[in-house]
Image: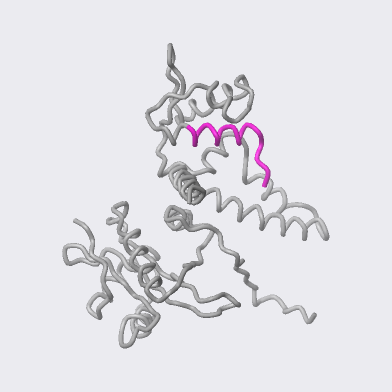
Amino acid sequence: MSARVRNVRAADLEQVAAIDLEITRVPKPEYWAGIYRRYGSGRRQQRFFLVAEAAGRIEGFVIGEVRDWEFGSPRCGWVFGISVRPGARLAGVGSRLLEAICGGFRRLGVAKVRTLLARDNPLILSFFRSQGMMAGPYIPLELDLELELDPD
Amino acid sequence: MKLQKNTLFALYSVLESASHPGRQLSAGEIARKYRISPHHLAKVLHTLAQAGVVESVRGVGGGHRFSGNAKRLTLIDVIGLFENVAAPRARRQAAGAGVERAIGTVLAEIDAMAEATLRSITVATLLKLMARQQRARGR
């Protein structure tokens, strides 16, 4: 059965959190409540929280937003969460979710979509690559805060 | 990252055969297209056949055809048949002290990014990229 992509509803949140839990094994109910408040309810403006539903069940979700002038970048779409229930994979659900959020970004006049991925997660990296995404002009950096900052 | 000749020839062969699924390509055909030695290429194709990436068809009109799963086979799977991609990183991370170690850390960072990139790109993804580039050139 083909999944239908639509905006998230409060009643979907439990299933969304369950998909995330199945994949990450880390329960985070407060996080999901906060994400729903910011991205799924009220005036969403430039924010998207979409779900894929098939036969009354949530099979996956995608979350993102339009970001303006972050680190000098002209406004672009940011996808910071996408997951598909493991049992529902390889059926195009992820592609449809990404296509839907990109459609939302386009309607807001955005011409570029970005995401940030763990390089040791080939599954999700391969998914985004298969959708045509390439390395962007930014490099993610991090600092171990246990180290002293260099005074220079 | 610099790939060895054999590895590059293997990637050419895999992509050529995967872009013509079902069709048998001779070593000579691929060698002519990429201006490489057919003798050298035959050895590369033998390794690919042993790994099940291509299938050898003997006899008149024989050749090689793609027999892998284009959606699952990644560039690192092919590269790994010919060279050890992880070796330079491991060597660099373990190397010496002081300057040597600091430079090794930076080079290992670059290697890790290259490896992640190669691990994330399947043959099917690369074929899609080729098609997009061809369409863009045609515009």
Q: Which residues are magenta?
A: B1-16
Residue found 52% across the figure and 57% down from its top:
A134
Q: Is residue B35 magenta?
A: no
Q: Image point 32% across, 57% down: which residue?
A: A86
Residue A42 pos. (x, y %): 31, 88
Residue B23: name its quadrant: top left
Single out the residue that lies furthest toward the front. Answer: B139
The percent position of residue B69, horizontal first and vertical second, equals 40, 38
Number of numbered labels in the structure image? 0
Q: Which of B112 and B127 lies nearest the eye of the viewer?
A: B127
Q: Closest to the observer: B61 or B132?
A: B132
The quarter holding residue A74 reads bottom right
Q: Is residue B9 magenta?
A: yes
Q: Does residue B104 appear to the left or right of B129 in the view shown?
A: right
**Prevalent SS, magenta region:** helix
Extreme-left residue of the structure: A55
Q: Pick the residue in front: B4 or A151.
A: B4
Structure colour scheme: one colour
Tell me residue A122's x, y (percent). Answer: 48, 54
The percent position of residue A116, horizontal first and vertical second, equals 51, 66
Query: Which residue does the image show at 72% across and 58% down from the upper left?
Result: B105
Q: Nearer the viewer, residue A12 or A47?
A: A47
Give the residue displayed 62% in from the left and 71% down from the top.
Answer: A142
- Please state if B107 lies on the left or on the right of A24 as rendered: right
Residue situated furthest top in the rendering: B60
Quarter where residue A51 is shown: bottom left
